[in-house]
Amino acid sequence: VQRTSSRLRNFVSASWKMGVDEPKKFIHGLKVGLALSIVSLFYYVRPLYDGVGSNAMWAILTVVVVFEYTVGATLYKSVNRVMATAVAGSLGVGIHWVASQSGEKFEPIIVGTSVFIFAAATAFSRFIPTVKARFDYGASVFILTFSLISISGYRVEKLLTMAHQRVSRIAIGTSFCVLTSMLFFPVWAGDQLHKQTIKNLENLAISLNGCMAEYFKNDEEIPVMNEGIKEKMQCYNSVLNSKEKEESMANFARWEPTHGNFTFRYPWKQYLKIGEAARSCAYCIDSINGCINSEMQAPEFLKKRIREECMRLSSHSSEVLKELATMIRTMRKSPKIDLSVKDMSVAVQELHDALNSLPTNFLRLRSLPPIAEDHPDSHQEEAERSAKASIIEILPLAAL
Amino acid sequence: VQRTSSRLRNFVSASWKMGVDEPKKFIHGLKVGLALSIVSLFYYVRPLYDGVGSNAMWAILTVVVVFEYTVGATLYKSVNRVMATAVAGSLGVGIHWVASQSGEKFEPIIVGTSVFIFAAATAFSRFIPTVKARFDYGASVFILTFSLISISGYRVEKLLTMAHQRVSRIAIGTSFCVLTSMLFFPVWAGDQLHKQTIKNLENLAISLNGCMAEYFKNDEEIPVMNEGIKEKMQCYNSVLNSKEKEESMANFARWEPTHGNFTFRYPWKQYLKIGEAARSCAYCIDSINGCINSEMQAPEFLKKRIREECMRLSSHSSEVLKELATMIRTMRKSPKIDLSVKDMSVAVQELHDALNSLPTNFLRLRSLPPIAEDHPDSHQEEAERSAKASIIEILPLAAL
């Protein structure tokens, strides 16, 4: 009992902490509650006793399944739901009519076969990447509505009214959702993606600085690893596995209307390119981290020799990263960026020269880690160049 | 028109190719069609004209939303759906009873408030990682059922029969799904995870060999990059972003009963550890790839000098990776693995010695890339050690 209660307490405190850290998640809960209560009361006040089973239900069901955290996701699901219901409804009525015309004997065969074929084809189509990205939810609604309508035993005229009612209920439900999610504290997927990208670049800058400082720290300093630095060094971890999240946010962002500085048809795909570049930087920092934790360490005097150059390079590199983050934030090409990149290139060259001018007997001793250090940076520089290139592509579009 | 038709043709041929490459996806479509047709015909043959709206519907709806690609996912959704419906149903009936006892004036207030509170709390709880991993779908079903029942205007006795009917329909639907997904060509999430892990390790081995061969290829060979090698070198890409997929498969695998060599409560989390190690290997290979594509290249004569050692190390490393893959496949500790690891350690030491014994004037020229090469491998070795450690943890459990 004690273990369960302590686990429960941990659970509650962890979720409370999450809510306090990200009040938007609390607010999302309140929004769902709000949308549902409005729809519920709407039907409760004008009781539709017998209709609850078949009609009002659809509005509530729609609110529950359509309401998502971001506006983009809600819009994506709403549009999918309405479209799929309409298409599947008309197709279902058509099949139903054909079946009812062809005699009692063939009716179940036609219905069964068509349900089988459409359901199988739609279920398969959900594996196709383009369908999955844009119409995954619609496909499942399509199967549902189509099979419900084509097997329902009603006459076609009654079916038409039913289908009409259902579509209108779903439209009510979706418009409640869309309005609630857009009007009360909206969470835009595009906004999230934008902030996430900035945050990732900043995290990379912090990690890079932290790792370099850790690697080249003097032994005179406290040998125990500083907690603050350790935390800083781990910042890049969030970047490593950011791909799927970014892709889904970019997918949802495409559904969103103009908001803030983001226009409709904003080039969200460019963010994915920046994300790609950021991830390859993160892989490099992971390699540097591997050097720090490795058993083979370069001798202290060798480290001292190139300490200056490496530190300068790392500080210039993270300067560039921070500058890029600022550029994305302000959506303006910063005048400083060219200078920063030039500084970084100079620092790369200096480190290179420093390595080449090392007395050769130093190198004989053990030359591995500090030289390996240079490689990630030059690679990083490449990644940054490509990041810069894609940002420059974005800039004119963002300025529209 | 021509553009649309060519795009359509591309789309069809791409999806056809996907289906032929992975016939399981075709079969999944057929299974969905089958399950739906059975449920549909079941109701079609015994027409429940008036009931279609409220009862039979639930069985069909359940099949559509619950049927997933893997058995684990289907079970997860089925269990979640049945449990959540039962819990929300009883809670809803309770609230409804309380509300109906407290007079007409307070009834809508009580119902509205409780819907708001429960919906908000449940919507928020979906952000909590543990809830998200195991009960995400259940939470959405809970909100749905709870609000439907608590706002429905029926008397409590009628509600009870309705709730009972609904749970039984959902049970029918889920059992159809579970049976279809387990009996016809089952796709086990655990199996997928297992195969994916093996495939990832093999891909790493192939990529490592390919990258090294490319890096140390003689200039006398054809300078144009060999297509086969290029493809091999990119194998590690699938490993880089495997995290989310692996986690969701491990989550679903936990729901699966004993199948093949996998028992219930099989330690699926160990696969996540192997995945973690494989990803850090992949990050290293990405760094090597960066060396290959870098503008700064080591001079040819220097490369030649350590070519032997590097190639030996890489072939030993990929030997170890392949051996690990075989061990996972056979679920047996291979007698060769200790030897392979020892060979690899020797190769690391040899490369190290070779680097130290290089004539110093070589190093002065440009020492960067080939030395950087050594670092990823030694890091990789670490990652492999940790992978091995976690496999050895699995072995006794797998042997049960």
Image: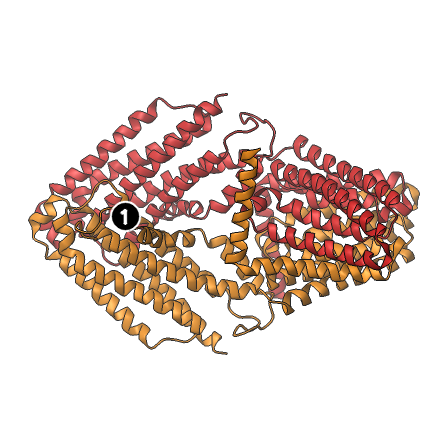
Chain colours: A orange, B red
Which kind of residue does numbered mark 1 sit on?
Met
Q: Position of B358 compared to A58: left or right?
A: left
Give the quarter of the figure containing the N terminus of chain B: bottom right
Q: Is residue A81 visible?
A: yes
Q: Is residue A270 left or right of residue A176?
A: left
Q: Chain of mark 1?
A: A
Left or right side of A179 for A319: left
Rendering coords of residue A316 (x, y %): 26, 65
Rendering coords of residue A162 (x, y %) = 86, 57
The residue shown at (33%, 32%) is B319
* Residue at 51%, 55% in the rendered image: A245
Q: Nearer the viewer, residue B379 or A21?
A: A21
The answer, for residue A375, to whether it is visible in the render is no
Of residues A79 and A146, the one drawn nearer to the viewer in this rendering: A79
Q: Which residue is mark 1?
A: A225
Crowd class of label 1 (few under 14; some 14 to 19; many from 20; radius 10 Å): few
Q: Is residue A134 above or below residue A152?
A: below
Q: Position of residue A12 (x, y in %)?
A: 56, 47
The residue closer to the viewer here, A197 or B136, is B136
Residue A4 appears in which quarter of the rendering? top right
Which residue is at a point 45% across and 25% down the rendered structure image?
A: B330
